[in-house]
Image (cartoon, rainbow, N blue to C red):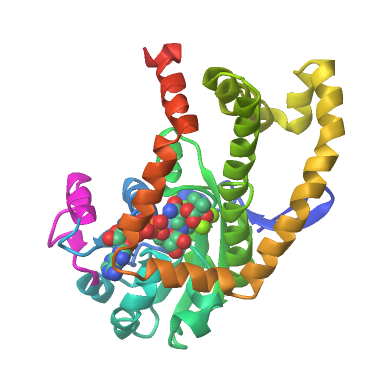
Amino acid sequence: MAKMNFGGVEENVVTRDEFPLSKALETLKNETIAVIGYGVQGPGQSLNLRDNGFNVIVGQRKESKSWDKAVADGWVPGETLFEIEEACQRGTIIQYLLSDAAQIALWPTVKRHLTPGKALYFSHGFGITYKERTGIIPPADVDVILVAPKGSGTSLRKMFLEGRGLNSSYAIFQDATGKAYDRVVALGIGVGSGYLFETDFKREVYSDLTGERGTLMGAIQGLLLAQYEVLRENGHTPSEAFNETVEELTQSLMPLFAEKGMDWMYANCSTTAQRGALDWMGPFHDATKPVFEKLYKEVANGNEAQRSIDSNSQPDYREKLEAELTALRESEMWQTGAVVRKLRPENN
Ligand SMILES: NC(=O)C1=CN([C@@H]2O[C@H](COP(=O)(O)OP(=O)(O)OC[C@H]3O[C@@H](n4cnc5c(N)ncnc54)[C@H](O)[C@@H]3O)[C@@H](O)[C@H]2O)C=CC1
Ligand SMILES: CC(=O)[C@](C)(O)C(=O)O
Ligand SMILES: [Mg+2]
Ligand SMILES: [Mg+2]
C-alpha cells in the first residue's frame, strides 16, 4: 500500500503499479465472481472483469430487459448467465449490484448461498451501514468487502475501453478468511479502477449520498436552472442563456479544470472574469454551505436512506422516475440543450 500526500494529508492508496493486473489474476484464479444485477454497475464491472481475464458469471432476472441486454453483451444463458439464485450458488465472490432497494428484497435469497469462505461484495456502503433499515446482516464466516467506483458504470466501461481508469474507494467490513484485503484490491483492479483509496462502509455511503445529492447532480441541476431562469426572465434568448450556463461550462471551462485544476481555468479566462468570479465565489459559497450542512445531517441520521428505500421499493418506482426525467428532458432549458448539442460541428 502506497502512502501518498494529498495537499498535506497522508492517505493509503493502491495503484496499478503496486498491484498489477497479473497479481489480481493470480489472487483470484480459483474464484468464480458472480455479478448479481445487470443495470448500470453490473455491465460495467462484469464486462471489464471478463475482458481482463477473470472467471466471471452474471446473475439476473430472466424476464427483464437487462437479461436481454446481457445476452446481447455476449453472456451465455446456462454458461455465464444465470437466474440470480443459481449465480449466487455458483459464485465464490458475490458482487451484489442490484439497486439498493432490490438488495433488501433479494437478501434472503443471497444469504442462503453465503456459505463459509465466500465473499460478499458491494459497490455502496448503503445496505450494511443502514442495516436496521435494510436487514442486511451477513453471516460471520464470509468476507464483506466494498469497491465503489466514483462514477457511473457507463463511464467505468467507457474509460476502460479508452485505456483509462475511474477511481474507486475500497473497504473491508469483515475479514473472515484472512484474504479480504487481497480479494478486495484484486477486484478493484479487475473492474478497471484507476487508483483505489481506503474508506469504510459508513464514510463511503455518507460521502456518496452527499455527493450525488450535492455538487454532482442535485446541486448542479438547481444552480444551473436558477441562472438559466434569471437570464430568461431578463430577456435573454434560450440560446444565449443555455450557452452561458451549460455549454460553455461543459465544453470549455470544465475540461480546463479537469486537466490542470481550478486555478488553470482562471488563468485561461479574462482578468475581468477572474476578478468578478473571485468576488462572487464567496456569496455563492455562503448561500449554499447551510444547504450542504442540512443535506449531510439528513444523510447521517438515516432520513435520506429511508426516503430512498420507501420510494424505490414501490412496484411502479421506475415509471415514476421516468415521468420526472421526461419532464426534465422536455423543459425549455434541456430542449434547448438538445438543439445546441445537435449544432456542435462534430455532430453534423
Ligand atoms: N449506477 C451507478 O453507476 C452506480 C451505482 N452504485 C451502486 O451499485 C449498486 C447497483 O446500482 P445500479 O447499477 O445503479 O443498479 P440499477 O438500479 O441499475 O439496478 C440493477 C439491477 O437490479 C435489478 N433489479 C431491480 N429490482 C429488482 C428486483 N425487485 N428483483 C430482482 N432484480 C431487481 C435490475 O433488473 C437491474 O439489473 C447500488 O448499490 C448502487 O448504489 C455505485 C456507484 C455508481
Ligand atoms: C454514479 C455514482 O457514483 C452515483 C451518482 O453515486 C450513483 O449513481 O449512485
Ligand atoms: Mg457515487
Ligand atoms: Mg451513489
Q: Give yes or no for residue 83 being in the magenta stretch.
A: yes
In the image, residue 151 above or below residue 238: below
Tell me which segment is drawn in magenta: 65-84
Q: Does the stretch in magenta take in 97? A: no
**Residue 211 location, quadrant:** bottom right
In the rendered image, the quadrant that contains the C terminus is: top left
**Residue 173 picture quarter:** bottom right
Residue at the (69%, 69%) spot, across then down: 297
Q: Position of residue 316 (x, y in %)?
A: 30, 63
On the image, the x and y values in percent for residue 87 come to: 24, 69
Residue 264 coordinates in the image, percent (x, y): 76, 26
State the image coordinates of residue 302 (x, y, percent, origin top left).
59, 75
Residue depicted at x 57% and y 49%: 218
- Residue at figure coordinates x 43%, y 72% from the top left: 310
Q: Tell me if residue 108 can be seen.
A: yes
Can residue 160 be seen here? The reply is no
Picture mark count: 0
